[in-house]
Image (tube, rainbow, N blue to C red):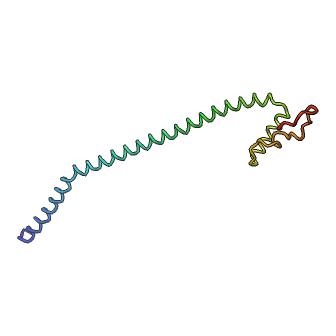
Amino acid sequence: MTDKKSGEYYDRVTESVVKVNEIVLGSAASTAMATMYITMAQAAGISSLGTVSTQQNRNILGTATIAAGTGNLLWSGMNDQVAELTISERLKNWETMLSVSEGNDGSSKDAQGSEDNQPDQRAEGEPERR
């Protein structure tokens, strides 16, 4: 296989392999840099995502803490107020809440205890007050 045709064929194959190797080796640095840049961009994005997620979770915890603290303050205040109410005052408050839940403004005579059911306490000759 030392004839002229085999030698030319061999030289062409060798030359092709050498050129491919040169292309691969020549582009290795730029490929490595591109891979590094892509990796750095992805790491920065994931880092930002983690930071945003952490901040959102802290905001949720802060809101829940404020709600729990405010609820405890209101509950203890309401317990003190309710403990001082008489049964009739509790019923009037319940009727007012029921009236408001039905769409009334809670200021009607029926919700506050009808004045018609109250005994007339006017003195004789005194005009009726409204």
Between residue 119 and residue 19, name the one nearer to us. Answer: 119
- Where's residue 46, x and y in %? 41, 45
Quadrant of residue 88 within the rendered picture: top right
Q: Most extreme residue toward the left, as rendered?
A: 4
Determine the residue positioned at 76% across, 29% down.
81
Name the image quarter holding the N terminus. bottom left
Between residue 59 and residue 42, name the one nearer to us. Answer: 59
- Where's residue 106, x and y in %? 76, 42
**How many numbered marks, from 0 up?**
0
Depicted 104 relative to depicted 81: above or below:
below
Residue 109 in the figure: left or right of residue 4? right
- Where's residue 110, x and y in %? 83, 43
Depicted 38 relative to depicted 126: above or below:
below
- Where's residue 113, x and y in %? 84, 39
Between residue 96 and residue 12, name the one nearer to us. Answer: 96
Residue 74 in the figure: left or right of residue 115? left
Between residue 83 and residue 58, name the one nearer to us. Answer: 83
Q: Most extreme residue toward the right, as rendered?
A: 124
Quadrant of residue 12 within the rendered picture: bottom left
Determine the residue positioned at 75% across, 30% down.
79
Determine the residue positioned at 55% across, 39% down.
60
Residue 71 in the figure: left or right of residue 55? right
Determine the residue positioned at 92% across, 36% down.
120
Name the image quarter holding the C terminus. top right
Residue 112 in the figure: left or right of residue 32? right
